[in-house]
Amino acid sequence: MAGQMDAWHQAWLSRDAGKQLLEFLTEDWIRFFGNLTVINHAPEQRYLNVPILATIDAATFVDAWFSLSRHDERLVVGSIKDRYEYRPELLDAEGPWWREVQVELKDRVARSKSKPRNVQINNLIGHINSTIIEKWELRQFEEFTNGNSTDLSWMTRKRVDSQ
């Protein structure tokens, strides 16, 4: 019975949970962050220890993210950085996902003709680098120096830059 429940839960996480979380991002900002980080007045904190973001398609996330006001759009990365402050192990799954988000953002810049908008998007890419990717790289380095890592791809990986 427990095995069936685990299997159901994993299927639900990978298929539906991320979609629901994206709806929260566009409809109820506090609920979105309340599910991912510890914040006051959050009705639930369902994914504090679950790398749920990695289950969401990067392009779909960017679409939802860009439906917010420009002010709220900037707050997304800053609000999520606390998630990794206390649970850095989530970066093992979500670090690569944030890179996918950055690549998607770069694609949006390449397709857009709006200079002011491209500057904003490039700032988001830089913000992801400074608040999330740097933490992820540091974690990979620490895992490596502690002898816990055999994946050395991080040593040769180039950052998605914001130019």
Image (cartoon, rainbow, N blue to C red):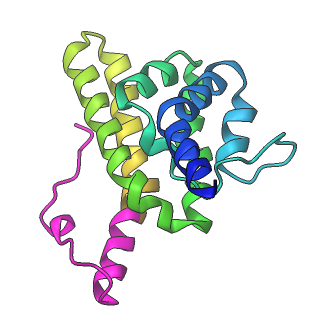
Asked which quadrant contains residue 56, the reply is top left
Residue at (23%, 25%) from the top-left corner?
107
Residue closer to the observer: 114 or 155: 155
Residue 42, magenta (yes or no): no
Residue 83, x across and y down, in percent: 60, 56
Residue at (44%, 19%) from the top-left corner?
63
The total of numbered circles placed on residues is 0
Residue at (38%, 54%) from the top-left corner?
95
- Please tell me whether residue 132 is drawn above or below residue 79 in the rendered image: below
Residue 149, x across and y down, in percent: 28, 79
Farthest residue toward the right? 41
Residue closer to the observer: 66 or 130: 66
- Please tell me whether residue 59 is drawn above or below residue 99 in the rendered image: above
On screen, residue 112 versus residue 30, left or right, reads: left
Farthest residue toward the front? 1
Q: Which residues are magenta?
A: 136-163
